Amino acid sequence: MKRHYRLTLIVKPETEILEKQASEIVSSLVDENITFSGIKVENKKSLTYHIKKLNTGTFIYADLEGNAIRVHDIEKRVQLKPEIVRFLLTSKK
């Protein structure tokens, strides 16, 4: 049974990210057996509180679908990408 997830990334705001670049970032984080359908990018959005001395960030929202996603694997891949400040993976019903 496939499950639905929402992946939210906060990326450093130095450069403006297009949807093509966002899909490349997301595809580098998830396994090949995970498909992602909708990607939404919000450039230069202000943060409620400072994260790593930043007060703005680019938000990337991606809808994922697949069998159980291992959050630990995504967390390891996020740590290898210095442009990603935070991530959140939630299950959709």
Image (spheres, grey):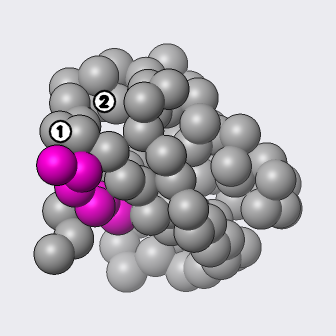
Sequence-first tag of 1 and 2: 1
Span colored in magenta? 1-7
User: Amino acid type of disc 2?
Assistant: Glu
Q: How many marks?
A: 2
Residue 83, placed above or below residue 32: below
Determine the residue positioned at 29% across, 22% down: 73
State the image coordinates of residue 59 (x, y, percent, origin top left): 56, 67
Instruction: Tell me the residue that label 1 is attached to.
Output: 68
> Contact (CB < 8 A) between labels 1 and 2?
no
Instruction: Tell me the residue that label 2 is attached to.
Output: 75
User: Could you tell me what secondary structure mostly forms the magenta stretch?
Assistant: strand
Determine the image quadrant of residue 16: bottom right
Q: Is residue 73 magenta?
A: no
| Disc 2: CA contacts within 10 A as few (<14), some (14-19) or many (>=20) | some
State the image coordinates of residue 55 (x, y, percent, origin top left): 53, 69
The secondary element bearing badge 1 is classed as: loop
